[in-house]
Amino acid sequence: MTDTSRPTATATVRIPAPAPGPDHAHHVPRQAHHAPDHVSAPAPAIELRGITKRYGPVVACDGIDLAVRRGEIHGLLGENGAGKSTLMKVLSGLIRPDAGMILRDGEPIDVTDPRAAAGIGVGMVHQHFSLVGALTVWENVILGDATAGLAGLPARQGAGRGRHGGDLLPGDGRWAGLPRAGLPRAGRRWAGGGRLRREEACAQTVRIGERYGIAVDPLARVDTLSAGQRQRVEIIKCLRRDPDVIILDEPTSVLSLAESRDLFAVLRRAVTGDGPPDVAACPGAGAGAGADAGAAKAVVLISHKLTEILTATDRVTVLRRGRVVARRETSGTDAATLAREMVGREVVLGEEAAAIGLTPATATATATATARDVPPAPAGTRTSRPAADEATALELDGLLVRSPAGSALLDAFTLSLRPGEIVGLYGVEGNGQHTLGDLMSGLIIPAAGEVRVGGRPVDLRRPGALHAAGVGVISEDRHRAGCVLDMSVADNLVLTDLAPVSGRMLVSRRRQLRHAAELAERFAISCPSLDAPLRTLSGGNQQRVVLARELAGRPSVLVAAQPTRGLDVGAIESMYVELRAAAARGVAVLLVSTELEEVMALSDRIAVISAGRMAGELAPEDADAESLGLLVGGAALTGPAR
């Protein structure tokens, strides 16, 4: 929901920042030096004072103060609905605050819209994609930039030269002479008679992607990309403009561990003023006032993964229910402290490690001697793995799916699941998981192979055949394929099956509301009303709606694709409880995830997918980052892998 109204008079009132206390100690960014006592500290790159935003009776942000300095990566933690994204949308011009003010280098500014935010050098990578699916990657990257990739620009910019004089094109001419088919006629000319330099825009996209370790094909249509690839496009689109202040909202939720490390390594160089000059050289970059490629940048990192916060940031601010509850130096805190401040209770690292981004081994090393014992498993939870000779609930046999270009997206993919078993399918994003999810949703018909549920083949040519056979699916991108945001909570809960709420001919409104109320209570769905549009719910509650709908159909097989993507600790824990409970009831659960800690924490077996093929299987006790990494890379293991 975007509020375009003008701020109230209180929006111009300066609210002093809180006085430094034990948790507000002065911080010197890594690789920086203490300033002499006689030199006053520079003003923060961006400062928010007293930011308040209300949606009816709900206070999303309640007088929040936040200061981000140049040369630092500032972590922002909080549960879903804590106000993190709302606060950053205020800074990026997407939402107008009801009260408070924003300062840039100590001077009050008025951020009226995203264009104004870009003008002062603020760039944001959103958690939920803001791309146009019908356009290609390079078109999305330059979308909204009135000077990007245009021929006929003033001579002072120079052909193939950036604003800092850097070469724009790789020099090998690989993007020259591209066919013009597919480029909309209306998009071939821009204001002033300028003509798009497609090869230049493609080259910029490739160079930024390669430099940051998030490469993507610039000619691919966005609606053909996986969620992970679309996230890369969002990041490239932001970094191309060379902003002074970079806001990253869950940027690694769809990146691999190696890609995440590479991204943070480059961001660290950027905040210390050693950012890559080839990125800064792109036309249209550095729209912020006084932008300088060599100047230190400020980065705000929103993440639920405490390992990322602890390793990548300098300072961290914790929000809970719209208020700041803690400000800490990263070097002086730990995962247990941050988790407790984030959720308002003790977090048992041994049991809940995956929910805060810790592998079991890391959690064991981090747990303190004062941590309470891990509670026993909930009643009804299965404590032993299904027998190897138990009948299969789901069989995927030799599945072959080809792209329009003829390449194999799934290549003779074979996997089986037994009742009551959680099988984790792990792999780097873009190795066939997205295709498998679409196939299990009935959106793709394989060129070869067979799907059997309970030993019976399923005719994938029949719409709804998999659902009728007892397969429930939690899509990897709930906004794309899992729900309808503008429909009510009650309507979304019956999207796949109207039978429980229908009479002979019509849907019974009374039955529907009773059905929705029962599911909302059972799955702890928090919403202002069952008639409220789904988009008004937090990400965690939206995912609970999808999970409740799929489990209400009493499936024999549940495919959960990236079920905790973008969720906070509490929502992740709730999802884990439901997945374990489903397995305890005999449901075969296929957990498709790129989260190593999640797969290791939940799975009875771990299968690895690489280039659309089954690379091998491991028992959880035999799995570690190294062995799984080898399988992901296509290497064969000796020993327990099979």
Image (cartoon, rainbow, N blue to C red):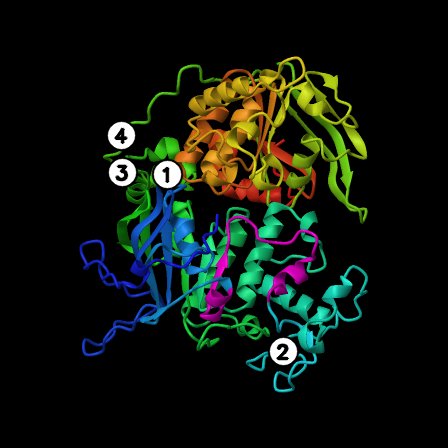
Q: Which residue shows up at 32% across the image and 52% down it?
A: 317
Q: Secondary structure at mark 2?
A: loop
- Residue tagged by mark 1? 363
Q: Secondary structure at mark 1?
A: helix
- Residue tagged by mark 3? 368
User: Mark 4 packing: few (<14 Cα in 10 Å), some, or many (20+)?
Assistant: few
Span shown in magenta = 115-144
Q: First in sequence: mark 4 or mark 1?
A: 1
Query: Which of 289/333 is in front?
Result: 289
Three-letter amino acid code at the position of disc 2 = Asp
Q: CA distance from mark 4 to mark 1?
A: 14 Å
Relative to 157, say whether 265 is above or below.
Answer: above
Q: First in sequence: mark 2 or mark 3?
A: 2
Report whether 109 appears left or right of 428.
left
Q: CA distance from mark 4 to mark 3?
A: 9 Å
The quadrant the C terminus occupies is top right
Mark linked to residue 167: 2
Three-letter amino acid code at the position of disc 3 = Thr
Q: Which residue shows up at 56% across the image and 29% down it?
A: 491
Q: Which residue shows up at 29% across the image and 73% down it?
A: 42
Q: CA distance from mark 2 to mark 3?
A: 53 Å
Are discs 1 and 2 less than 8 Å apart at CB? Answer: no
Q: CA distance from mark 2 to mark 4?
A: 58 Å
Query: Which of 631/611 is in front?
Result: 611
Dot in front, 4 or 3: 4
Res. 446 image quadrant: top right
Q: First in sequence: mark 1 or mark 3?
A: 1
